[in-house]
Amino acid sequence: MIKEKEKQGESEEKSEKSTTLTTSTTDTDTEKISKNDFVELEFTGYADGKVFDTTSEEVARQENLFDKNTKFKAMAVSVGQGQLLAGLDDALIGKNIGSSFEITLQPEQAFGKRDPRLVKIAPLSVFRDKQLNPYPGLVVNFGGLIATIRSVNGGRVTLDFNNPLASKTIVYKVNIKRKLQDLDEKLKAFVEYYLQTDKFKLNDNKIFLEPSFLKACPPEALTTFLTKCKETLQLELEIAEINEKKKEEKDSEEKSQKKSQKTD
């Protein structure tokens, strides 16, 4: 799924006419969305009339976007936290739970305008050294940044670090399914978004994660997650390994057994 944090080269320009909102097609609930509310959404995004983003497996298959490693399902988000494109995020505030709407986003509120400064030239030898055969349209990770190769000519490779959807008008069709009330559901939404995993356990003020995941997870992702939990959910959590939880459970069980033996 393409999200706000994945944008590259977004212009800082803002437009007062950045969004065009189509009247809601359904309105089944009178409760309105406020900032920081957690809601579950179904949506499909279009650029140049073609689908580029969707929560629907059926649509993904129809548009040849299906990926077995991607979970196509309703997405739980915290409104106003930058988990969606800016224009879509803003548009949710004030909408009714259970409603559907269509919104058109201008580049300033979507993936930004193309920035010529993000088009770079690299020597072909850099790719040869890595045993890569560059060609126009190939998407590569170059120095930790994602780029699209635009041309290969005379021993030089032109790299475009702009988001492929930069300068495009984006249309989203959205269905607001429900509002999340349960704290566990809200925490799960944060874990899945900021840590990109659904394997965790919560006990008191500790969140337990797989050791292999913690080893690979960027420290900044963990910091952001903990900060968001504190600011939005009023939860001050500590990160711990799953193995540590098992040890705590074992210690607790042993204490219970000893207490039972003394009682007997």
Image: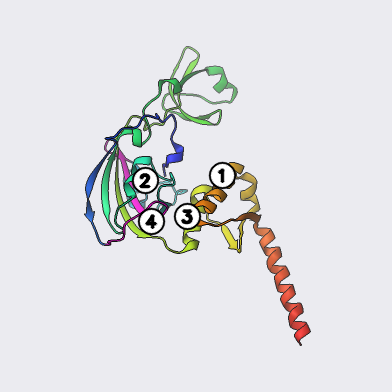
- SS at badge 2: helix
Residue at the location (43% across, 35% down)?
A: 7
Q: How far across and down, in percent of the image, does residue 260 sit?
A: 73, 82
Between disc 3 and disc 1, whose residue precedes?
3
In the figure, is residue 181 to the left or right of 258? left
Element at badge 1? helix
Residue at 27% x, 61% y: name it: 30
How far separated are the C-alphas under marks 4 and 3? 9 Å
The front one of 257 and 123 is 257
Mark 4 crowd level (few <14, some 14–19, many ≥20, 10 Å Cα): some
Q: Which residue is mark 1?
A: 221
Q: How far is mark 4 from mark 2, CA to CA? A: 13 Å
Answer few, some or many: residues within 10 Å of disc 3's Cα (few below 14, many 20 plus, some between 14 and 19).
many
Mark 1 vs mark 2, foreground winner is 2
Rendered position, 206 above or below 249: above
Q: Amino acid at mark 2?
A: Asp
**What range is drawn magenta here?**
29-51
- Residue 167 percent location from the top left of the image: 33, 29
- Whole-Å distance between the Cαs marked 3 and 1? 15 Å
Q: Secondary structure at mark 3?
A: helix
Q: Can you say which quadrant of the picture contains the N terminus?
A: top left
What's the residue type where badge 3 is placed?
Ala
Residue bearing mark 3: 189
Q: Which residue is mark 2?
A: 89
Residue at 38% x, 41% y: name it: 85
Q: Secondary structure at mark 4?
A: strand
Query: Are the residues flagged by discs 4 and 3 in contact, CB closer than 8 Å?
Result: no
**What percent of the width, then of the height, locates residue 164?**
39, 31
